[in-house]
Amino acid sequence: MKPSKIIKIDPVTRVEGDLKFQAQCDENGVVTDAQSAGSMFRGFERFLVGKNPMDALGITPRICGMCSSAQSYTCSNALRDLFQVEMPANGYHIKNIVLGVENIQNHFTHFYLLFGPDLAHSRYKKKLGYNTVNRRFRINGDSYKQFVNLRNDFMNLMGIFGGRWPHNLAMQPGGTSQILNDRLRLNYGYSHYLAFKEGIESIFLGCTIKEWRKIDTYEKLKIYLEKQKNKSDLSLFLQTGIEFGLDKLGKGPEKYISSGSYDLMDGSFLFKPGFYDGEFKKFSHNQITEAIKFSFFEDDEKSSRHPFQGKSQPDNGDNKEKYSWVKAPRYDDQVVETGPLARMMVHQDPLVIDLFRHKGASVWLRMFARFQEAIRTLEVLNDWILSIKINAPNINHWETVTSGEGVGLGSAARGILGHWIQVEKGVISNYQVITPTAINASPRDDHNRPGPMEMAAIGTRILDESDPLELLHIIRSYDPCLVCSCHAVRING
Amino acid sequence: MKLLWLQGASCSGCSMNFMCTKKPNIIELQERYDIEFVFHPSITPLSGKEVEELLQLYTKEPIDLLIVEGGVMTGPDNTGRYHHYAGKPFMEWITRLSETAKYIIAVGSCSAFGGIPVISPNINDVKGLQFVMRKPGGFLGEQYKSRSGFPVINIPGCPAHWMNVITVLIDISLGRLNLDDLDEYNRPEYVFKDYLHHGCPRNEYFEYRQEATHVGEEGCMFENLGCHGPLVKCNANLHRWFDGWGSCTYAGFPCIGCVSPGFPEESFPLFKTAKLAGIPVELPEGVKKSAYFQSKILANRACPERLKIKKGE
């Protein structure tokens, strides 16, 4: 009998930021305990105290270089709430375009550059489809190469609508800063969009988005897979993903939250907000609390708090129970998952729901939901670009305030994003950010319940403890972004 | 050439922008310029123990190029506990790799000058590699030279524009980067020679002093909206972003000076120009206050009708 063993992965790469993952296995190689640890602390919210409210727009995107536009979007929403300013239609369209381009790009980049190469691991050599996977998905493989070029042309849309990427200031509280009376730029934006859409249709989907969107049940998906015969990257992933066992890996909590994504002018969202715990329920940000029992912060008399009452000071490192710079956010006192799978679940995307009912959550479904969200967003991008009215205003002016509060919710590629701002005497007195990876990669909470990613790892059988590929699949399926998560500290000031 | 890329106190934004590079793209860069990524957190396949072993190896063996993105966290109390990587404080890796590296390139304002996490009160004691803001020294010290005799080559920007990084990589791979190519902040001078104002699409408004008062309006953003365009050496309007389609002022928002050694501390408050008696406190280098004032009165008078910003609409 093999003795139990501890597997340490430090650093986990091809995730963003610094993640350390540790799993304990029993004699059969089954994970009995897991620890996900953010190993860097930057202290972002602290920088903002005492600054002008508008300074937040320059600082908060720099929390994260991948979801910089999502941070801008959410910060501008918090400031819009604070200043009580309305946005013109063009403002909505352009903000959604910039966020959409970022999210779509993030999702596909995650697949082609960060997640996909693991499928070309030599362990799968004997599996059906391996040779094709290896040729297309390995680093610098055929599809990898094609995507790099496709992506880099697509990013021109960031130049056209956002000016630069990451870290643009185009998203403002009252709208966006571009003066798009230059129809030429707008037309070229559309032309870049069409080129990318065609590229995705041809290499990834193997059919048009329109045809793809008719597939809304597991049965229809099987017919699609039959027809494709692994020609498109999506079908190759879905087929070999099952062949390699990804549909039996990394279930997670099977409880999901989304704060809604892409604000529309009538107050609704492109993808609905909600909470799923077996039933579909309403979402309220007031239900979010953060625990710090296992995080490197000084303990507080009240261990779980809403982010607005958040109180945290880095500890002195003596408490050996603590292991992460990430706090442990919970919703309605439950361990929940956020991200594309959560968004597609609470939005009740018919295909994702049907797959969930048939197969349950897994690495495979988490990846699939990410694609489904990207494709659906890519589909509406067309309408947003064409809806921009030339010579109509993109922005309304606002007056600054000397005191008040604002809440901004948004949607980064990896899940819900929340910004809370409080202003006193004209300057920021408190700023709090909740990021998606803080939720997914969180450590244990004050009831000792593991976070979603830890939960997804526990119970997994590890074939080779010196090369824990299963854990890497699970971790990467969440597309964790630790630079975002380990920013969160507030020292009452 | 073997290239090792590490991320300190960073947001990964410089890497994300770097991956947008075209001609060469990230693959062509490796194929055409004999640059081998032995490690990049998002590009190479290694994970866990393999990374630690690789870093260990290059603390003994020479590495041609070390790129650092993000500042070096030394806090709390010089323990580096705020940032652990591959089994030890990140700062220890930098100390040891700095002894074996032939060239070190600081990509982005954070590794060059400290950048974002240095914002007062700098609770994590973050340092740039050889500067903390404008002050020489930083983590490696003012006297530090890599094995090639170069100090850390700084390519600031938040993020650093991939073109500026690639051009320096090409220079090094062709063996034509010289010590006197660097300016007082150890930036390649040919990259950071011109002010952002050069090539700004709103130049005509500046010439005739037609000033915007709100973001999203026509007009120059220098006198009211805190635009650092005439104050900061940045080629983003000359070479622009994404096939020439973007830059800060192209998209209608003011420059906040993200390539400047003083960024972001010297840029606050954003979107607001500090003024004294109606004149910006900070004027373009070498311009006298009285001369600026007089020229602007004349400029305003000379403004053609087609450019005039109509107020109160």
Image (tube, coloured by chain):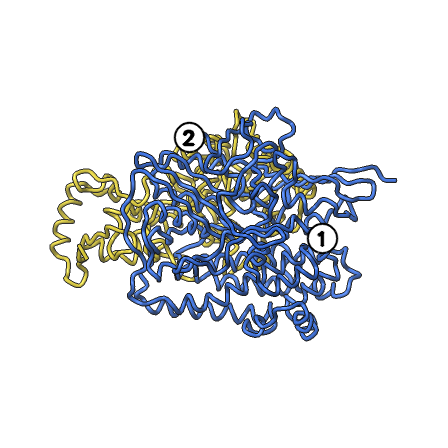
Chain colours: A blue, B yellow
Q: Circle 1 is placed at which residue position? A: A249
Going by the numbered disc 2, the residue's amino acid type is Pro
How packed is label 2: few (under 14 Cα within 10 Å), some, or many (20 or more)? Answer: few
User: Residue B113, relative to residue B77: is it above or below?
Assistant: below
Q: Nearer the viewer, residue B70 or A46?
A: A46
- Left or right side of A457 for B92: left
The amino acid pointed to by label 1 is Leu
Q: Position of residue A320 (x, y in %)?
A: 65, 27
Left or right? Give the position of B225 relative to A34: left
Q: Which mark is on residue A49?
A: none
What residue is at 61 percent from the left and 42 percent from the top?
Answer: A19
Report helix, strand or loop for mark 2.
loop
Q: How many marks?
A: 2
Q: Residue at the spot x=23%, y=58% of the render?
A: B204
The x, y position of residue B17, in whole percent, is: 49, 53
Quadrant in which the C terminus of chain A appears: top left
Check if mark 2 and mark 1 are on a common chain. Answer: no
**Where is residue A242 drawn, in percent x and y?**
73, 61
Name the residue at 50% across, 65% down: A378
Indicate whether A29 appears above or below A159: above
- Horizontal and vertical percent position of residue A13: 62, 47
Quarter of the figure with the N terminus of chain A: top right
SS type, badge 1: loop
Vertical side of A108 occupied by B152: above or below: above
Q: Is residue A132 left or right of residue A53?
A: right
Residue B220 vs residue A262: left or right? left
| Label 1: chain letter | A
Please tell me whether mark 2 or mark 1 is closer to you in this view.
Answer: 1
How far is mark 2 from mark 1, CA to CA? 45 Å
What is the chain letter for disc 2?
A: B
Which residue carries the number 2 mark?
A: B121
Q: Is residue B236 visible?
A: no
